[in-house]
């Protein structure tokens, strides 16, 4: 076997093994127990998602159904059958372009001040939490947890959208889900 064929075999093996390792790590994390309200323990099962159309990978709650290219309906797996949408997107352009899109789709005139920053696996995210109405939904007030980041080519967005009462009843659960979804979002690795 030549050095070139060994290198090609190693590259192919890496392309097969890397997604399997990521999936194994995500599945292992899914079995972890997190502190939930009132000292209860439990687990929040997550599943990996790979979105070739948007060039991103991450996690969502196990049992969510994909609605379109950038969102998952997770209402069937929330506490008390609450409403939950998880949005994960990569938008070519700058962070300002991405903020403009958020403004166009909400009743906000500007983003509130960031509530913090969070270091994920691929990005450092600016975090926001607010209530608003979505222009496509009508006069329903929604709770939005939003994370924004960028690299040289694109802006990245993670949002968890729910009803304010659902969020208030299970804030720790929603915050835990949001943290894991934000942490895991990353660009898809390109084939070498």
Image (cartoon, rainbow, N blue to C red):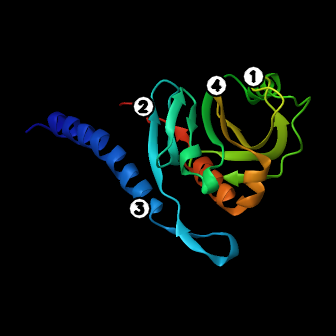
* CA gap, disc 4 and disc 1: 19 Å
* Residue at (44, 45) in percent of width and height: 48
Label 4 or label 3, whichever comes before in sequence order? 3
Query: Is residue 181 toward the left or the right of residue 37 in the image?
Result: left
Q: Which mark is residue 50?
A: none
* Residue at (24, 42) in percent of width and height: 13
Q: Residues within 10 Å of mark 1 (few under 14, many from 20)?
A: few
Can I make out residue 153 in this image?
A: no
Front-most of residues 73 and 92 = 73
Q: Which residue is mark 1?
A: 136
| SS at circle 1 | loop
Q: Nearer the viewer, mark 4 or mark 3?
A: 3
Q: Which residue is mark 4?
A: 91
* CA gap, disc 3 and disc 2: 24 Å
* CA gap, disc 1 and disc 2: 34 Å
Q: Residues within 10 Å of mark 2 (few under 14, many from 20)?
A: few
Disc 4 to disc 2: CB gap under 8 Å: no
* CA gap, disc 4 and disc 3: 30 Å
- In the rendering, at what x and y percent does residue 72 appear? 55, 36
Q: Which residue is mark 2?
A: 190
- In the rendering, at what x and y percent does residue 124 appear? 68, 47
Q: Residues within 10 Å of mark 4 (few under 14, many from 20)?
A: some
Label 3 or label 2, whichever comes before in sequence order? 3
Disc 4 to disc 3: CB gap under 8 Å: no
């Amino acid at each position: 076997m030549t050095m070139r064929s060994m290198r090609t075999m190693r590259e192919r093996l890496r392309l097969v093994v890397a997604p399997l390792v990521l999936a194994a790590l995500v599945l292992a994390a899914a079995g972890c127990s997190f502190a939930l309200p009132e000292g209860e323990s439990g687990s929040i099962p997550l599943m990996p998602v790979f979105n070739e159309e948007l060039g991103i990978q991450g996690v969502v709650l196990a049992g969510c159904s994909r609605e379109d290219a950038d969102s998952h309906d997770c209402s069937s797996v929330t506490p008390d059958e609450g409403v939950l949408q998880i949005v994960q997107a990569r938008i070519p352009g700058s962070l300002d372009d991405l903020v403009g899109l958020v403004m166009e789709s909400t009743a906000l005139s500007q983003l509130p001040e960031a509530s913090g920053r969070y270091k994920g696996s691929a990005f450092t995210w600016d975090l926001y939490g607010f209530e608003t109405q979505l222009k496509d939904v009508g006069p329903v007030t929604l709770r939005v947890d939003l994370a924004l980041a960028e690299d040289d080519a694109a802006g990245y967005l993670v949002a968890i959208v729910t009803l304010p009462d659902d969020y208030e009843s299970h804030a720790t659960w929603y915050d835990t889900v949001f943290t894991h979804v934000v942490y895991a979002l990353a660009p898809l690795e390109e084939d070498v």
